[in-house]
Amino acid sequence: QVQLVESGGGLVQPGGSLRLSCAASGSIFNIKAMVWYRQRQGKQRELVAAITSDSSRVYANSVKGRFTISGDNAKSTVDLQMNSLKPEDTAVYYCKISTAEIPPHEYWGQGTQVIVSS
């Protein structure tokens, strides 16, 4: 069973940067999309950024211009570069990789905590 492992979370001051990484324990074939979600305390999980197999990217309005998603289908990895962090970016961040199969197979990471605080 392939698992996703996230890393890179932690405590950072407002205005700082973090880079989250997500790697699969094995190869994932026929990747359709790689996505970062986050869940803030007391809130529903929300999409932060996504990248598709054709390298199209989408971002939540709240992170546009500050976050950048990058992925490597061959390595089954996806990163999230987060700059100009704000306290409201504090959340648990999750990665997800989904395949183009019907129905799609989804792989989820366990989550990594990001805390933005002075």
Image (cartoon, rainbow, N blue to C red):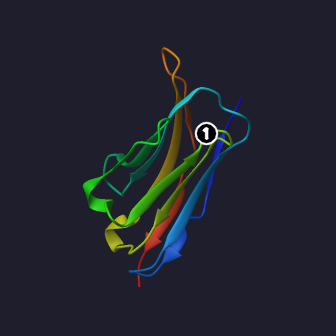
Q: Residue furthest top?
A: 102
On screen, residue 63 versus residue 109, left or right, reads: left
Q: Is residue 117 above or below residue 115?
A: below
- Give percent across and percent down for residue 69: 47, 54
In the image, what residue type sits under mark 1? Asn
Which residue is pictured at 52% across the width and 46% down the height? Answer: 95
Residue extending farthest front: 54
Q: Quadrant of residue 108?
A: top right
Q: Measured from the top left, where is residue 10 in percent x and y?
A: 55, 70
| Quadrant location, the N terminus | top right
Label 1 Cα neighbours within 10 Å, binned few <14 / some 14-19 / many ≥20: many
Kindly state the secondary structure of the residue where label 1 is placed.
Answer: loop
Question: In the visual, does 53 lie left or right of 57?
Answer: right
For residue 62, side relative to residue 71 (left or right): left
x then y, percent, for residue 82: 45, 66
Residue 110 seen from this side: no
Q: Which residue is mark 1?
A: 73
Quarter-of-image position of residue 62: bottom left
**Residue displayed at 51% across by 40% down:** 96
At a point 36% along the width and 57% down the height, the residue shown is 40
In the picture, measured across the screen, residue 109 lies left or right of residue 68, that is right
